[in-house]
Amino acid sequence: MLDLQLCRLLLAWLLIVSGSQTLIVAFKYEGGAKRSLDTRDTSSSNKTVLPAQFYPEFNSSRVMIRYGPWNVPSMDMMNGMGDYYTRDAEMPCTDCLITWMQAGFEYPNGTYANANTSLWLHHTFLVNSGRSDAVCGMGWGGERFFASGNERTVVDICMNGTDQVGYYIGPTDRVRFEAELMNADMVNQTATVTITYEYIPKPPSSFTKVTPVWLDIGGCDNPELPAKANTTFNYVSPAWTSTLSGKITTILGHVHDGGINIDILRNNQTVCNDVASYGQSPGYISPASMDMGMGMDMNMSMSSMPPATNDSTTSPSMLHISSISTCSGQAISAGDLWTVNAHYDTTKYAPMLDTDGSLMPIMGISLFYVAEGQVGSNATLTVGANGMDVAAAAAASGSGSATATSATATVTGTTTSGAGGKGGISETVLGSVVVGILLVFGGR
C-alpha cells in the first residue's frame, strides 16, 4: 500500500536519479484517490522582463517566467486532470532575494486561460530541494516557498515594498516546480503556467531573509480531504509548534470551490481570516456548457444546485473562487501552537465534481513568511460559530480582492474539526495502488 506522500517522494527520487529533464510518469489509483496522473516535463520556459515596482535603490528587477507548455487531457480522461513536474525549474536569479511573486495561466500564444475557457490552474508550487521545510522537514523533498491556486493571489512578501525582506535563493539551490492543471473541455488543451518574480540581485545587509511556513488541513501526509455536499463543514489542521520568533510579513490562504474562508490560529486564537470571493471577473464565471466537471456533472440538473447568489441568471455552479484575502504583520514566537481551520459551505457555492458526479477532494492551506527578529502584532480577531469575523464578512460581500487586517479583540466562539482522528482529521487511506513508471532519458 502506497500513500500519496510516498508517491511524491518516489517521484522526487526518480527526478534526481534520472539525470534527465524529461520524465513521464503514469499513476493509477484503485480506491482512495480517483484520478490518474500523466506527467510530462517538456523543460521549456522563457522570460519576459517587466518594470520593477519596489526598491529601485537596490536595483530590483521583475521578470515573468513561463513553465511548459503542458498538454492537459480532456475531461473524459483522468477527469481532465494532469500533474506536471520540473526537477530543476528556472529561477529568475541566484544569490538573490525574491520579494514578490504571482502565478498566471495562459495559452502558448499568450492569451488568458481560466474557467471561462475551461482551463484551470488547479494549483502550482515551488520546492527548494536544498532546504528542510519548517513544518514537514524533508517530507516534501525540500522547503515549500511558493504556492498558488486558480485565484492567483499575489505573494507580497515585502508588504508592498514597505518591509526590507525577501526569500533567499542561493547559488547552488535547486528548485522543483509542480503543477496540477484541469481541463473541462472534451478535447486536450495546451497551456503554460507563468510565475512573475520581483527580486533584488544581491542581498543587501539591511534585508531579512524570510522562512516560509506551510500549514495544511491534511498535515504533512495528504493535502486533499473529502468534500461534503449541501452542508457546512470544516477541517482543522494538526498543530505545528513554532521554532521561529519574529513577524509574519504576509499570510496567504487557499481553499477549493465551496470554501468560504480559512482561519489561521495562534494558540487557539484567530489572528487572520482569509476570505474567499467568487465570480468577480468574467474569467471566474464558466459558461453553462463548461460547467460539467467544475461544480456540475453533465448529468446533474441546474435544479439540484444551490440557488443563485449574485443574480437570477447566474447559478453558483458557474461561479468560482476569484480571490482570497490576505493578512500581514502578525507576531510569532517559538513555542506558539499554530493551526488552520478551513470552512466550507456547499449550500451556498457548489463544490467541484469528477466526471462521474462524485465530489472532488478539497484543500485548506495557509502559507506565510516569517522575518525573524522583527516585531509583529499580537492582535486577535473576533470570530463567530461560522468562523467569520465582522471585517472578513464585510470584505466577502464587497467586490475586488480584499486584504484583511487584524483588530484588537477577543476570540468568541469555538472551532471544531470536521472529522475525528489525529489533529481533528480522519486519516484517508488510499486503496491498493497500481503504479506504472516510464522514464525517458535524454529528452524527446
Image (tube, grey):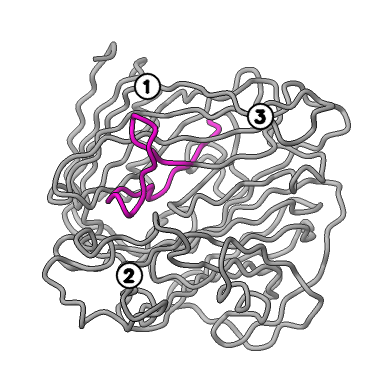
Crowding near pointer 2: few (<14 within 10 Å), some, many (20+)? many
Q: Is residue 221 left or right of residue 57?
A: left
Tell me the amino acid under the disc marked 1.
Ser
Asked whether 75 or 224 is in front, the reply is: 75
Question: Which of disc 1 and disc 2 is earlier in sequence?
Answer: 1
Mark number for residue 43?
1
Crowding near pointer 3: few (<14 within 10 Å), some, many (20+)? few
Q: Which residue is mark 3?
A: 51
Residue 221 forms part of the magenta stretch: no
Q: Which residue is mark 2?
A: 351
Q: Secondary structure at mark 1?
A: loop
**Range covered by the magenta-colored residues:** 104-129
Q: Secondary structure at mark 2?
A: loop
The mark closer to the camera, 2 or 3, is 3
**At 32% from the left edge and 84% from the top edge, which residue is drawn?**
307
Residue 298 at x, y percent in the picture: 14, 65
- Residue 201 position (above or below residue 135): above
